[in-house]
């Protein structure tokens, strides 16, 4: 991610928040449904898999562990989008948000170029239909709903880093929040009281009050953080790509309470509260490593690793905590894992370079 900073400064310059507001407002497209005139009925427990190179979603029926639908992602002008990245669901509506950075981030987060725009797509999760697309001035990493479902938050991965906050109903830009350099993933704590932005260029994490939209803390972490992944234990877990580590943040104190050295570049981190395990994907070696919690000192202790597929990246757990689904970007599949014994049940073929994954109706 740090390699994009010089291009952005030299060719884009510094963009003021007022300019960003006007630019974003002009680039909002109304839905005409020409691009994605879907009429599906996905009313079963499903995993939605974002296929970056194919510009599509694979829908896996969890009762069968088979792909039952493939949704081509097209914008409101009927043009196919390239390199969709992460996917989130509204907590109040059956809507999905997908970030479209417009570049391949499968080999790390340093693929951005000057003048590269991003996009947020909003889809109906049941019908697969496009509801809205929002074109952004700069590439983004994810787009996530606020805990009350009233807003959509997305970052702008530039030197003069920002988070854009949109109204989830009118899609008007409500707020521009200045954060650190080259912000990537935007996430919220489990209780919804804090927002976290991983600033890859500054090696820190911005903490924001979701109500006031004001920054309340800046937490130093490892080298090139990508995301602060939510834990259900009053912690956030930051994957530091270049630092090859995970920084464990205590939500209450806004401090790093443990740094886990990995020895590999992390893909993502997932906390399984029901099994009391912490999983980290290892893309280069096609594995998932897991840690268990030492209840005496409340630190994570390394457990073991198991193979999934080359380019192991995102993890999603079923509601009962018994099964995991792992996207393997270079293997073009999703591994189904039994959490009880950490063994693979099967691989499910999906599209090219699967990235983000989301489980709903489970």
Image (cartoon, rainbow, N blue to C red):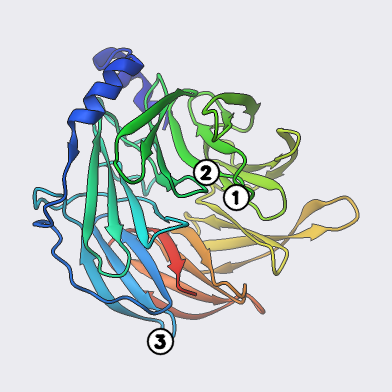
Q: Where residue 291 sits in the image (x, y, percent)?
A: 71, 59
- Circles 3 and 1 in contact, beta carbons < 8 Å: no
Q: Where is residue 173 in the image (x, y as percent from the top left)?
A: 32, 31
Question: Sequence order check: which comes first, mark 3 or mark 1?
Answer: 3
First in residue order: circle 3 vs circle 2: 3
Q: Find residue 234 and report its horizontal and vertical position in percent.
A: 71, 48
CB within 8 Å, label 1 to label 2: yes
N-terminal label among 1 and 2: 2
Give residue 310's quadrant in the image: bottom left
Q: Crowdedness of circle 1 by 10 Å Cα count: few (<14), some, many (20+)?
A: many
Query: Residue beneath label 2, please?
Result: 187
In space, the residues marked 3 and 2 are separated at their CA atoms by 31 Å
Mark 2 neighbour class, 10 Å CA radius: few under 14, some 14 to 19, many 20 or more: many
Q: Locate residue 40 relative to residue 276 in the image: left or right.
A: left
Asked whether the viewer can see residue 35, the reply is: yes
- List the residue tagged with mark 3: 64
- Classify 271 as above or below 197: below
Say which quadrant the N terminus sits in. Answer: top left
User: Closer to the camera, 190 or 346?
Assistant: 190
User: Is residue 310 shown to the viewer in this render?
Assistant: no
């Amino acid at each position: 991610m740090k390699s994009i900073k010089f291009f952005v400064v030299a060719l884009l310059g510094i963009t003021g928040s007022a300019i960003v507001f006007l630019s974003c407002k002009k680039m909002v497209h109304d839905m005409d449904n020409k691009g994605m005139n879907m009429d599906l009925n996905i009313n079963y427990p499903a995993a939605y898999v974002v296929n970056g190179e194919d510009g599509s979603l694979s829908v896996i029926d969890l009762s069968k562990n088979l792909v039952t639908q493939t949704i081509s992602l097209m914008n409101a002008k009927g043009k196919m989008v390239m390199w969709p990245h992460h996917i989130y669901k509204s907590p109040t509506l059956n809507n999905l948000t997908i970030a479209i950075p417009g570049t391949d981030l499968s080999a790390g987060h340093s693929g951005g170029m000057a003048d590269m725009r991003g996009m947020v797509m909003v889809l109906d999760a049941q019908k697969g239909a496009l509801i809205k697309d929002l074109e952004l001035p700069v590439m983004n990493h994810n787009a996530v709903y606020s805990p009350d479902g009233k807003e959509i938050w997305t970052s702008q991965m530039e030197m003069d880093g920002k988070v854009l906050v949109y109204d989830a109903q009118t899609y008007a830009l409500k707020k521009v929040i200045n954060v650190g350099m080259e912000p990537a993933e935007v996430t919220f704590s489990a209780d919804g009281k804090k927002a976290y932005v991983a600033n890859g260029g500054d090696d820190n994490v911005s903490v924001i009050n979701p109500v006031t939209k004001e920054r309340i803390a800046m937490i130093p972490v490892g080298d090139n953080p990508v995301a602060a992944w939510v834990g259900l234990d009053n912690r956030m877990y930051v994957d530091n790509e270049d630092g090859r580590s995970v920084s464990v943040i205590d939500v209450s104190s806004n401090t790093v309470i443990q740094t886990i050295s990995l020895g590999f570049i992390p893909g993502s981190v997932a906390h399984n509260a029901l099994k009391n395990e912490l999983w980290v994907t290892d893309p280069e070696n096609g594995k998932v490593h897991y840690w268990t919690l030492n209840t005496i000192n409340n630190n994570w202790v390394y457990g073991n690793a198991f193979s999934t597929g080359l380019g192991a990246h995102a993890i999603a757990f079923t509601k009962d905590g018994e099964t995991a689904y792992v996207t393997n970007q270079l293997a073009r599949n999703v591994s189904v894992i039994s959490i009880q014994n950490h063994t693979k049940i099967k691989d499910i073929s999906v599209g090219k370079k699967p990235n983000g994954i989301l489980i709903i109706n489970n």
